Amino acid sequence: MIYLNMLTANSDSFWLRIIYIVSVIISGAVAFLILGPRPVGIEGSLDVSVLPILNATLNGITTVLLIVGYSLIRQKKRQQHKNVMLSAFGTSTAFLISYVIYHWFKSGPKLYTRSEEHTSELQSLAYLVCRLLLEKKKQKKHKYII
């Protein structure tokens, strides 16, 4: 029995290492594909406008599958859990492929520019929120002193 537990622990440790290594490699590849140089003329050559909706749908399906998988493992239904988790892995993989295609073919980066007026409005709002929170905290503190 102890030997079986050691085998399971070693197997888990092995798969955790594999998961970490694959995660780092995939993250690096996605970062390169999104941020790295693109071949000339590839931007906008494919209409990818529908892919954000597909990405959201795939993420929603994956979320539902993960919740169902959690429920199944809590009920000790291991084979059904395994099947649902493999399905979640599949939809997550489809999302990753769609996401990379979208960012590879979309026409240019979206530039986020702010005017000075807009920036000062945000700063004023942040200052107001901080002041209100500090004032409320001060009132709570003095409430018990009197």
Image: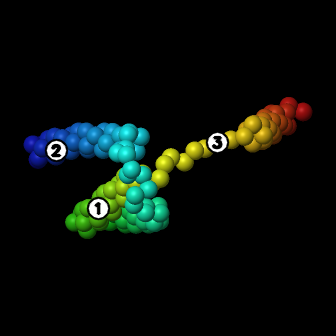
- Residue 42 versus residue 14 in the image, above or below: below
Q: Which residue is mark 3?
A: 113
Q: Tell me residue 95's x, y (percent).
A: 37, 59
Q: Which residue is mark 2?
A: 11
Residue extending furthest toward the front: 41
Q: Quadrant of the C terminus?
A: top right
Q: Give the residue type at disc 3.
A: Thr
Is 100 located above or below residue 76 in the figure?
above
Instruction: Name the one closer to the observer, 46 or 122.
Output: 46
Residue 129 placement (x, y as % from top left): 77, 41
Identify the element where label 1 is drawn: helix
Residue that badge 1 annotates: 90
Q: Residue at x 61, y 44 (%)?
A: 112
Q: Is residue 112 above or below residue 145?
A: below
Left or right position of 138 against 7: right
Task: Tell me where residue 56 appears, x and y as whole percent.
Answer: 46, 62
Asked whether the residues under the numbered discs 1 and 3 touch, taking CB atoms below 8 Å apart as contact, a structural biologist would say no
Q: Amino acid at mark 2?
A: Ser
* Residue at the extreme right of the image, as rendered: 146
Per the rendering, the mark at residue 53 is none
